[in-house]
Amino acid sequence: MVSTEYIPLAERDKVLFDLKGYLLFPAVLSAEEIAPIKEQCEKMRQDKESLPPAERKLPGGAASLLIDHPAVMRVLHQVIDDETEKLRCESCFFSYRYRDDGHKGWDPHAGGKSVNPNYSYQYHDGKIHSGMTRVVWELNGVEKDKGGTAFIPGTHKSNYRKQLNLFDERDSGVWESYSCPPGSLLIFSEGVRHTSCPWEQDDPRMALFFCYNHINVRHHKPDFPPEMLAALTPERRRFFNEVYHPQFDRW
Ligand SMILES: O=C(O)CCC(=O)C(=O)O
């Protein structure tokens, strides 16, 4: 059982997110927490029908404990909204990668200041207001520069949005990636220029990609099946509410 209590995000991490546009927290999940999620993901990949309907789609089943994991909430409360009821989860998928898997690999995208609420990243009145925010759980270890997501740090605030492609070559000297043990948590603003990479490790990548946003905004088409939503606790189901402002519930 994951406690919903959390230690507020350190000042250093808040400033680092603003500076770079991403944060990495190593080994947040224990081996005992990772195992059932990996088992669910393997079944989804190889034998979906063996799972109950509510667990065939992420983030149902064992993975549901990640929806409001305290290590995620303490960041989203700082960068999207400090009220949980104003946070939405709008997509979740499993990335299974292996060497020569035919994946598109290097594919830089996003970056630069934007007024589109989905890619917007603002700092106002002493607070960060990040639009679409990715939360990635690396269930297996990641070796540096061998397939983890790569970033051009700081580009969520870059003024030269259309010229960022000047740096798109992998060896342009501005890309940064990470290594991490299993169970690590990567959180980034979709506004920072980033890319997937060819997977060059022996162990596959097993990563869950969640996408969060403010309750007022949506980027993805909603496609969470009713049986998955029905099996969640009310506190977790709330993350899949339609786009609206919760003040209307009070009137
Ligand atoms: O696969 C990856 O490492 C990056 C995924 C990505 O580009 C995204 O989440 O927008």
Image (tube, rainbow, N blue to C red):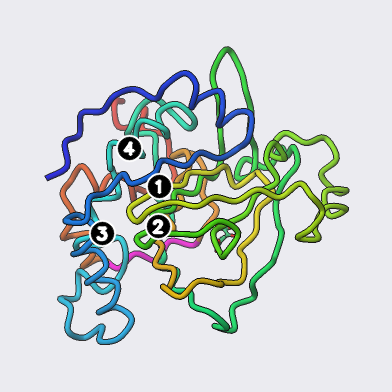
Q: Distance between the residues labelled 4 and 1?
A: 8 Å
Magenta span dominant secondary structure: loop
Callout 3: SS: helix
Kindly identify the amino acid type of the residue bearing the numbered disc 2.
Glu
Q: Residue furthest top?
A: 125
Question: Which class describes the residues within 10 Å of circle 2: few (<14), some (14-19), or many (20+)?
Answer: many
Q: Distance between the residues labelled 1 and 2?
A: 6 Å
Q: Toward which corner of the image does residue 109 lie, by quadrant?
A: bottom right
Q: How far apart are marks 2 and 3 (CA)?
A: 13 Å
157 left or right of 66?
right
Residue under the image location 21 percent in, 56 percent down? 31
226 left or right of 21?
left
Cβ–Cβ under 8 Å for marks 4 and 1 = yes
Label at residue 71: 4
Q: Which of 164 and 232 is in front in this view?
A: 164
Q: Provide the residue span drawn in magenta.
A: 221-225
Coordinates of residue 80 in the picture (x, y in percent) = 48, 32
Instruction: For ligand 1, give the image quadrant.
Output: bottom right
Label at residue 134: none
Coordinates of residue 147 in the picture (x, y in percent) = 56, 65
In primary-sequence order, the first of circles 2 and 3 is 3
Callout 2: SS: strand
